[in-house]
Image (cartoon, rainbow, N blue to C red):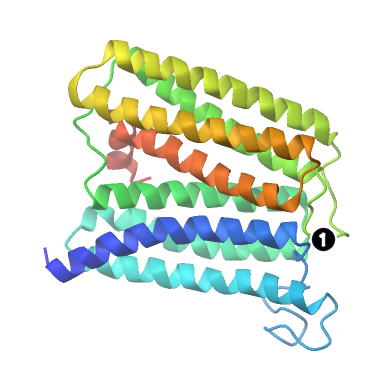
Amino acid sequence: MAPTASRALLKLSSLMVFTQSAIVFTGALVRISGSGLGCSTWPECTPGSYTPTADQPEAPLHAWIEFGNRLLTFLLLLNALALMVAIFRSGRRELGRLGSLQIVGILTQGALGGITVLTALNPATVAAHFLLSTILIAGALSLRQRAHGKSPTEVTVIPMVSRLIWLHLALTSSVLIAGTIVTGSGPHAGDSVAERFNLESRTMAWIHADLVIALLGVSIALIIAIRLGLTGQAREILARRAQIFLIVALAQGGIGYIQYFTKLPEALVAAHVIGSLAVWLSAWNLFISSNLGANLIARKEL
């Protein structure tokens, strides 16, 4: 393995996790600031121009916020292409599918972003845009951990822990999906003309909170099962990562309750988006730390 290429792989794989997460946050800033239709069409920003113009129908600041988010997609793509070069130069061909997933996913996200604009920020397409990002973040983290040697296939778990880990991942996914429905029913639509889900936002927030409570309960049960049922490396690695998840989830839940009772101020909504990224990253890292995730990745490169 060429040392320079190896260092590049390690740095670019870590950067991929950061940039995939960063574009979710900047997308949230677009929505919170009401800039979702700052660029009124796609792939152009306005008819006849790929950049904001002086006669922008939306406020100029909104146009530049939305345009800046679009530009970040190109940085993501450059990161993914450079990462693929580093993968092949380092001889780590087994990471090729994970690297390809990033390129294909970014191109798909660009098209989905266009559909989101052309449908005037339909909440279903906005939700799909976010959920596709979670898949790409999971793929980027899987690649990063394998490149750094931090997805140990030797960590095996007993059936009870296996079932709890699967349930934990399923509940975390459900919480994120429910969160997009709450967002699609709430006040931060991204633009004053954007439609909302025809759902009562407070009821959806309660369902979302109930799922979070269930997730916290499963997290505690998982920590206990790991402590009682595993030994050695498996116990050390999984217990530590399960505990990290629990701390992150508790903090995120606290932010969620505060923003609910304070009528969703923009700063707390932004903090909640960061929290959702931290929850998903810690949940996926826990999953791929077990033989379940490691074997799944080895078979499917996902």
Residue that protrudes farthest toward the top in the picture: 228
Across and down, in percent, residue 97 comes to 33, 54
Question: Residue 39: in sight, yes or no?
Answer: no
- Residue at x 31% of width, y 66% of height: 84
84 to 285, vertically: above or below: below
Element at label 1: loop
Across and down, in percent, residue 128 comes to 64, 49
- Residue at x 19% of width, y 68% of height: 5
40 to 1, vertically: above or below: below
- Residue at x 68% of width, y 42% of height: 180
177 to 142, vertically: above or below: above
Across and down, in percent, residue 177 comes to 63, 37
- Residue at x 22% of width, y 37% of height: 152
Kindly identify which residue carries mark 1: 191
Left or right, 253 with respect to 52, comes to left
Across and down, in percent, residue 297 comes to 32, 41
Question: Residue 297: in sight, yes or no?
Answer: yes
- Residue 193 quadrant: bottom right
Question: Front-most of 129 and 300?
Answer: 129
